[in-house]
Image: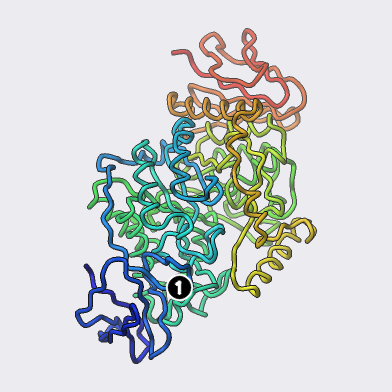
Amino acid sequence: MKPLEVWAPDVGQAELVSDGNRYPLDRTSSGQWQPRGVLLPNGANYGFSLDGGAPLPDPRSREQPEGVHGPSRLVEADFPWTDQRFRARPLACAVIYELHVGTFAQDGTFDGVIARLPHLAALGVTHVEIMPLAEFPGAQGWGYDGVYLYAPHRAYGGVAGLKRLVDACHARDIAVLLDVVYNHLGPDGNVLPRFGPYLTDRHHTPWGAALNLDGEGSREVRRFLLDNALHWLEEYHIDGLRLDAVHELHDCSARHFLAQLADEVAALSERLGKPLDLIAESDLNDPRLIRAPEVGGFGLDAQWSDDFHHVLHVVLTGERQGYYADFGGLADLARVLESGFLYTGQYSEFRKRCHGQPLDKGSLRRLVGYLQNHDQVGNRARGERIGQLASARRAKLGAAIVLLGPFIPLIFQGEEWNASTPFLYFTDHQDEALARATRDGRRREFSVFGWRPDEVPDPQAPETFHASRLDFAEIERPEHAAMLGFYRELIRLRRERPELATACVEAQHDESRGFFSMDRAESRVALNFGNETLRAPQPHAASFEVVHATEGAGLDGETLVLPPESVAVVVRRS
């Protein structure tokens, strides 16, 4: 068993405290404090006292059984893994499913997610992406305010529960991606600044002080975050990480934190003999994230494309408020599908500056595309999904573009059956001042979109959380079953006919008629966004067949007939 130690470079005395006993620690030259031969038993609760103060939880705590304000617990239990032969599929072949543990399963636990894995396997999912689960305040929340980055949230099922979930996913040939937050720490229960310079006032984020990645003491802070990433990948057999808002990782070092992270994860991947992926969320349209290190990139495996989501959302819903004002119609959609980003250096009216840079050739396969995700649903005042903003027919058009388009497709929980439940922003802050600030801040934030304060649900209200839980019983209803069948068929086609998922797309469009198509040499995905039936000539129609279509769409001789708001998938005959 490894002795417990802690980094606290600026204190004069440190003690390990457990079961009422205090054990003096010795300081090393690097500011690390180490015990004098003390080994606590597995399952012991403990903390660290600095300069004689009350014990604080361990910054690297593996378990917080009483939450962010309670003691840490020593956890070094073996787990009977059964996934030795599992290897995640390449991201280029992936269908990712984003889920929130607390609302995906009725009981809000890892075991509850396990019970729903047959549904995901039948859908055709290859990777589940779990929203952040590092210990955060209260019982329920989105997880982006975590403060103990090594400890799986106790309300979800803790250490053993997460390992059971990963092992069960692997048994069904489903990889696991974990959303991690390295750009800020939550405000409630965050004691890291009392140990050392984890935060810096040299850089700021929308959530407060930034993590110290390039100032005095940054070597140990970087090590804290790098070890955390390796910890999830090795100890929990996680197959990859989704890195939250990497544009808020402020690092002026010669070697950026992300480049170092990519190098260390690649080394771990080689040592373990299995693929490990890093996927970035970024607000910058910056190709350096996925560019190879030898040509000045950070070497990450993929990044999200908000440009794709935003323009597809505008086409489907007609909304133009807030950041949607920068996006237009089918011409913009065509450009995004062919180029990856819409903004590649031109002026953004919403941002009031030039934005983005062109992607490198061949990088489209490294973008993640989505019709919905937690941000784009949950950061609406009422948490509406696409099914509440557009007709089911138009939602199918969006699904076809995502699942048969050039990018790595991501589905947000419940999207596949057009779930009627919202996904709202909810918190469980125990500090009333923080709860009030969160409530007021959300109302101010939504004012730019034109929502009134009384339209914004209280994040702290229990009913806000409960309303966001998925209702799997909906799947039995005809309209929801039909949408689920549509998603399953598109995913099957993507898997069985690789020509429908290649990155090289030629997009055709006719804005006035509402016609749009994604063409490859061997296939065409044709869509009618308009209100009138379209008849599109199909050259060499005898050599092609319709393999999937919504009602009424199909070939009529050498003409492709598309009723209003319909889609047809046409491929060359075998």
- Position of residue 271 relative to residue 556, above or below, is below
Quadrant of residue 346 within the rendered picture = bottom right
Q: Is residue 484 left or right of residue 241?
A: right
Specify the color scheme. rainbow
Give the x, y percent position of residue 54: 43, 85
Q: SS class of the residue under badge 1? A: loop
Which residue of the protein is positioned furthest toward the left in this rendering? 37
Question: Which residue: 67% across, 16% down?
Answer: 552
Quadrant of residue 71 within the rendered picture = bottom left
Does residue 254 appear anywhere in the picture? no
Question: Which residue: 30% across, 56% down?
Answer: 235
- Position of residue 240 relative to residue 479, above or below, is below
Give the total of numbered labels. 1
- Position of residue 490 relative to residue 87, above or below, is above
Q: Nearer the viewer, residue 6 or 282?
A: 6
Which residue of the protein is positioned furthest toward the front in this rendering? 19
Q: Nearer the viewer, residue 298 or 174?
A: 174
Give the x, y percent position of residue 502: 46, 32
Question: Which residue: 27% across, 46% down?
Answer: 81
Q: Which residue is mark 1?
A: 70
Q: Is residue 224 left or right of residue 500?
A: left
